[in-house]
């Protein structure tokens, strides 16, 4: 609950917190539901919220003062997180190219009459395509902007 409180005080969505901290959205959701988190996860969150890790690991909820962050700092953190996500996508794309090329060579050397490498190429390619859609925010609904609008609406800041 403390993580959720800190996140909402800054007006961040779960996806934005995940991007800024380098965690997955699912991890943020689990922690906000009260599941235990690893020390590394807590360190990442403490760093993002600019508080001592002891404040996050204490069993009772501590009233943490709101650290004033400017819109520029928040936007900068989100921009850095987006650039990291784009970098991960391109690294994944490079791995895809190398592995599929290697599989194609193995396939053509061992059994050129049946091109079986096409199946992993298609399956993995679909995964790459989905990652591209989310990385470059080509799906207009249910993205970070939509989530932030829903949080603002729920908090009564925007109707």
Image: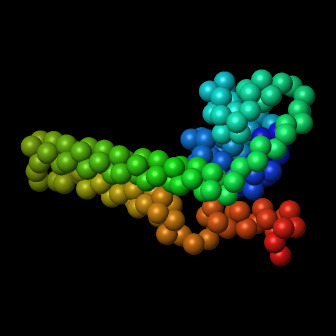
* Residue 22 or residue 46, whichever sits in front: 46
Residue at image location 36% in from the left, 51% down from the top? 90
Would you place residue 19 above or below residue 151 in this image?
above
* 100 lies left or right of 49: left
Residue at image location 76% in from the left, 66% down from the top? 150
* 91 lies left or right of 58: left
Residue 97 image point, x, y percent: 26, 50
* 28 lies left or right of 121: right
Residue at image location 42% in from the left, 47% down from the top? 88
Question: How many badges with numbers are in the image?
Answer: 0
- Asked whether the viewer can see residue 102, the reply is yes
Residue 16 image point, x, y percent: 64, 53
* Residue 98 or residue 58, whichever sits in front: 58
Residue 43 image point, x, y percent: 65, 29
Would you place residue 136 above or below residue 140 in this image?
above
Picture quadrant where residue 4 is located: top right
Would you place residue 49 above or below residue 139 in this image?
above
The quarter of the picture where the C terminus appears is bottom right
Residue 22 image point, x, y percent: 56, 41
Would you place residue 34 above or below residue 98 in this image?
above
Q: How is the image coloured?
A: rainbow
Residue at image location 40% in from the left, 49% down from the top? 87
* Residue 49 or residue 138, whichever sits in front: 49
């Amino acid at each position: 609950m403390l993580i959720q409180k800190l996140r909402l005080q800054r007006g961040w969505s779960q996806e934005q917190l995940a991007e800024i901290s380098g965690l997955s959205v699912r991890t943020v959701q689990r922690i906000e539901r009260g599941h235990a988190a690893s020390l590394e996860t807590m360190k990442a969150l403490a760093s993002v919220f600019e508080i001592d890790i002891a404040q996050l690991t204490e069993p009772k909820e501590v009233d943490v003062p709101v650290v004033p962050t400017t819109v520029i700092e928040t936007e900068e953190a989100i921009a850095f997180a987006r650039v990291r996500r784009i970098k991960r996508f391109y690294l994944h794309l490079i791995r895809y190219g190398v592995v599929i090329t290697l599989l194609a060579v193995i396939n053509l050397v061992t059994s050129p009459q049946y091109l079986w490498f096409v199946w992993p190429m298609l399956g993995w390619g679909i995964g790459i395509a989905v990652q591209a859609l989310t990385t470059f925010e080509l799906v207009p609904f249910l993205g970070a902007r939509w989530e932030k609008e829903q949080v603002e609406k729920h908090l009564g800041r925007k109707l």
